[in-house]
Image (cartoon, helix red, strand yellow):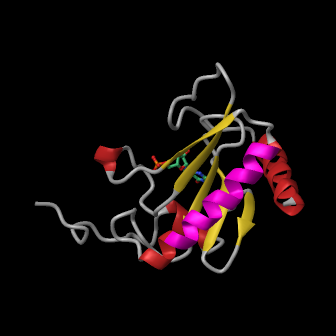
């Protein structure tokens, strides 16, 4: 039987390092409990990630208050992402453990703007141009400021 305790949180994971400022990220939003930034291998234009600041591997071991903060930020950022890219819709998803497709073991929620007739790109399909990510982050921040 599986347990949420079975695999420990690794504080050296890449998102923990982003939270500590050891690795740069194109940040779009930050508050006391959450951070949102551009995915470096976007599955679509404007692909954004929302993470809690509190350590958690995934959905199962996160504190409910931390999850609630993530949900509120997901909604706030999703609205801005949709507006910034004039998207027709959004795909929001979250993976747990390798069997579930997770590759970075700090809880995160993906927000991907969607356009009628345009399929999602492959998961971790290729690195985006940093200048493009910088521009996209600025567009989302501007939309957040307008909300
Ligand atoms: P997962 O499969 O764990 O849900 O997805 C992890 C996501 O993190 C992937 O979409 C991948 O492109 C993204 N990612 C991996 N390394 C980095 C990084 O160093 N910086 C950023 N911003 N995103 C990353």
Q: In which quarter of the image is the C terminus?
A: bottom right
Residue depicted at 56% across the width and 49% down the height: 110
Q: Is the residue 114 above or below the residue 30 in the image?
A: above
Residue 99 visible in image:
yes
Q: Is residue 37 above or below residue 3?
A: above
Closer to us: 146 or 10: 146
Residue lying farthest to the left in this orientation: 1
Question: Which residue sits at x=79%, y=39%?
Answer: 85
Q: Looking at the image, which residue is at 71% across and 42% down?
A: 46
Number of labels in the image equals 0
Magenta stretch?
68-83
Image position of 84 (left or right of 107): right
Based on the displayed image, in which of its 4 quarters is residue 101 positioned? top left
Residue at left offset 64%, top offset 19%: 117
Q: Position of residue 78 (x, y in %)?
A: 68, 52
Q: Is residue 93 left or right of residue 20?
A: left
């Amino acid at each position: 039987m599986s347990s949420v305790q079975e695999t420990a949180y690794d504080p050296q994971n890449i998102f923990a390092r982003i939270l500590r400022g050891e690795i740069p990220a194109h940040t779009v939003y930050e508050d006391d409990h959450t951070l949102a930034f551009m995915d470096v291998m976007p599955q679509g234009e404007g692909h954004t990630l929302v993470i809690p600041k509190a350590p958690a591997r995934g959905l199962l071991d996160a504190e409910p208050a931390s999850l609630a903060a993530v949900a509120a930020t997901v909604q706030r950022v999703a609205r801005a992402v949709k507006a910034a890219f004039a998207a027709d819709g959004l795909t929001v998803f979250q993976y747990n453990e390798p069997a579930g497709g997770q590759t970075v073991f700090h809880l995160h929620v993906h927000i991907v703007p969607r356009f009628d007739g345009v399929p999602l790109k492959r998961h971790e399909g290729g690195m985006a141009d940093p200048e493009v990510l910088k521009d996209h982050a600025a567009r989302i921040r501007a939309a957040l400021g307008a909300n």
